[in-house]
Amino acid sequence: MNTSPEGKIVILCRISLTIKVHSARFLSRTECVATPLAVRLPGGLDPPGRGVEARFDLTDAAASMASMVSRVAFRAEPFRCFPQAGGGRSARSSRAPVASTVRCASTRIDAPKKPFTPRELHVQVTHSMPPQNIEIFKSLEDWAENNILVHLKPVEKCWQPQDFLPEPSSEGFYEEVKELRERSKEIPDDYFVCLIGDMITEEALPTYQTMLNTLDGVRDETGASLTSWAVWTRAWTAEENRHGDLLNKYLYLSGRVDMKQIEKTIQYLIGSGMDPRTENNPYLGFIYTSFQERATFISHGNTARLAKEHGDLKLAQICGIIASDEKRHETAYTKIVEKLFEIDPNGTVLAFADMMKKKISMPAHLMYDGHDANLFENFSAVAQQLGVYTAKDYADILEFLVTRWKVGELTGLSGEGNQAQDFVCTLAPRIRRLEERAQGRAKKAPAIPFSWIYGREIQL
């Protein structure tokens, strides 16, 4: 820390420059912008008339390199004389250390507090689809109206959450709630962890609509666009909205869960967003949604099966009706990708292989409750153990899509396309073999507390 000739207190920071090139995609130029840190110095170190300035120094050589590549990520790091609070990386960030205070000798600098720190898992890639391919999706407007919108139901024919819940205006409301609570007492905690995780995933719906509206050529440009793609996105969102509403109300009435912790988790998750690595590319986006809709169909179907085994037929009905919606939506998304294979088989198989190489991340992979930095991993482990959603299911979905889209029958592909075809057609058996080996080496894990169920522990 130094004092400049102008009388400003200057904090010197070092810039780490990370340069990554993705598939030879180059931009004509890259702008690097460093945002000054807003900090206040306590103890009279910020005298009247003197500002506080964060000065970032980027060498000419690094700047020259930055102008040659398309993806640049950089972060400010304090000099080593500033130890990090806690002695390591923040539990909420996989990219850079975060600390509320920075110390050097007797001087303390208080950083401004944020509501939370979202995690950025990797450098972002954007707009990877060739611009000319946007015309493909414009040309499919009429096809989408006749083949995709038919998988939506009129609102008046849709079920609503209240169809499956106690009627609050009836004289028997309290008795119905009492019966619901009695049935829920027979359900074990590990099941509730899975049901809560599924509900939180459904409740982060604003993120999923946002994600769909990042896709080039199909986004809702106005918020009320009448294109077939925009109509689908809004109506799909409206149908999905009922899922979280229903599960949320059931869990509230059950009295078995800590609703405040659940609500905090939902707020954290929506604030963190999601990163499916679809790159504004509808090829990647619709492959992702095809996979995910089938995954949620399987997950809700398994919670329905387990609820029935535990004697709660009403909960089984709830989970089953949600699963049926997911199946209908899966059909729509897989039809879109099937059409892309028909129009552009080489580009579509390359996109399929790209998504599978990156691995399909679950929509709630940035889940956090304010306590457990590994919440999603722990929730996933419970789901795997209980058979709600497993590595085997992941391989089965991949194999289902390969068969559904007849990927193995594609001909006339480029050399790169043939390699992509071989990769996706042989991946599912490899995943199963790896999972079998992992299960064979698995050791008993410690019991994990979940804030959603008042800190009660689940043995993994």
Image (cartoon, rainbow, N blue to C red):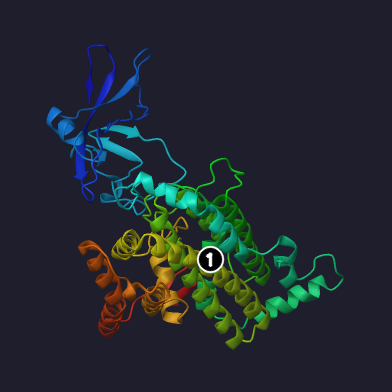
The answer to whether residue 4 is seen in the rendering is: yes
| Residue at 70 percent of width and 77 percent of height | 180
| Residue at 29 percent of width and 30 percent of height | 34
| 77 left or right of 338 in image | left
Q: Residue furthest front?
A: 412
Frontmost residue, 256 versus 128? 128
| 423 left or right of 308 in image | left
How many numbered badges does the structure rendering display? 1
Q: Residue furthest left?
A: 61
Image height of 307 relative to 405, above or below: below
Q: Secondary structure at mark 1?
A: helix
| Residue at 63 percent of width and 68 percent of height | 251
Frontmost residue, 350 versus 345? 345
The amino acid type of the residue labelled 1 equals: Ala
Q: Residue 103: x and y, percent?
A: 27, 37
Q: Residue 192: x and y, percent?
A: 55, 74
Q: Residue furthest right?
A: 171
Q: Residue 176: x and y, percent?
A: 77, 75
| 168 left or right of 353 in image | right
| 170 left or right of 370 in image | right
* Image quadrant assignment for residue 262: bottom right
* Image quadrant assignment for residue 46: top left
Label 1 packing within 10 angstroms: few (<14), some (14-19), many (20+) = many
Frontmost residue, 161 versus 190? 161
* Image quadrant assignment for residue 2: top left
Q: Residue 92: x and y, percent?
A: 37, 52
Q: Which residue is mark 1?
A: 332
